[in-house]
Image: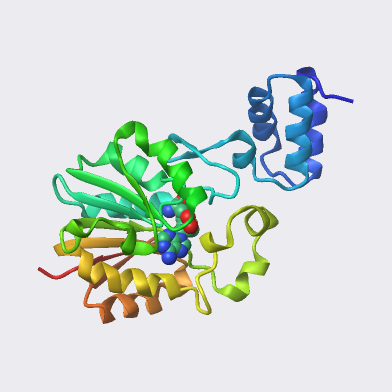
Amino acid sequence: MALSHSDRPALVQRLRAAGCVYAEDEADLLIAAADSAAALTDLVDRRVAGQPLEHLLGWAEFCGLRVAVDPGVFVPRGRTALLVAAAAAVAGPAPAVLDLCCGSGAAALVLHGRLAPRWLAAADIDPVAVACARRNLAPLGVPVYQGDLFAAVPEQWRGRLDLVVANAPYVPSGAVALMPAEARLHEALVALDGGVDGLAVLRRVAAGAAEWLAPGGHLAVEASAGQAEALCAVLAGAGLVPTVVHDEDLDATAVTARRPA
Ligand SMILES: C[S@@+](CC[C@H](N)C(=O)[O-])C[C@H]1O[C@@H](n2cnc3c(N)ncnc32)[C@H](O)[C@@H]1O
């Protein structure tokens, strides 16, 4: 039987029983997203079956902005607010900025509003993510390139970038199977799997940043707290000068790394 909008208490109960911690908020969002009782039933069925709320709604809230998120695309996490804040804090005036491994383009979207970049672009290897990021960023005139890390970026920017933000995948391969089903089953593996120690993509980001940053420019990356020391060694090995920032409340760790002038 289709749910009607007046069945909110039953809907909340069903979501709670399925393990949704914020069942009341989710119920309200799903009710608002459905244009019929049948559509609401379908959304709730899919949520109870484990699909991420954001994929069902088609958007995620990130740093106070609504970001479009298509099925399969990495859902921007609240903890990445620290990465964006750390990146904005080291950016100089009118920077040239690249959001590498952009996913939905959430970081670029926020930085567009926080900085006054003279150039801002995003890039990702996954065509589904690129299409999603274009939906978020094209209205702002921000280009989104598809390709493997810096190979996607126009050559003219080599050695001229002031800020590279990269929330690259950093989950060790062996830990992907331990992730919540919402991530494991509904986000692309390429968005999660960071290789044996989780730092495989970040090693390549660090090496590329040493070439693509302008002297005095900064790379900003995210990792787990336990990876911070090894990541700093990687960044230092690439000739960059790392600084770790951590936020207990967000359970977030970011590292900024400066290319010496
Ligand atoms: C953890 S997700 C982060 C997405 C987005 N930055 C965010 O914070 O919501 C990592 C992203 O890196 C992309 N990615 C993985 N390997 C890549 C590579 N070699 N080149 C470019 N992008 C890559 C994935 O497609 C995915 O969108």
Q: Residue furthest left?
A: 261
Q: Residue at x 23, y 42 (%)?
A: 115
Q: Is residue 196 visible?
A: yes
In the rendered view, tell whether residue 85 sits above or below residue 198.
above
Q: Position of residue 196 (x, y in %)?
A: 53, 79
Quadrant holding the N terminus: top right
Relative placement, left or right, of 213 versus 69 is: left
Q: Residue furthest right?
A: 1
Relative placement, left or right, of 24 versus 173 is: right
Quadrant holding the C terminus: bottom left
In the rendered view, tell whether residue 97 sits above or below residue 258.
above
Q: Position of residue 165 (x, y in %)?
A: 32, 56
Q: Nearer the viewer, residue 4 or 46?
A: 46
Q: Nearer the viewer, residue 53 or 253?
A: 53
Q: Is residue 251 visible?
A: no
In the rendered view, tell whether residue 133 sits above or below residue 91.
above
Q: Position of residue 251 (x, y in %)?
A: 49, 58
Q: Residue at x 39, y 59 (%)?
A: 147
Q: Position of residue 99 (x, y in %)?
A: 33, 52
Q: Residue at x 19, y 50 (%)?
A: 96
The tally of labels here is 0
Residue 137 is drawn in which quadrant? top left
Q: Nearer the viewer, residue 110 or 25?
A: 110
Instruction: Please state the quadrant of the image where ligand 1 appears.
Output: bottom left
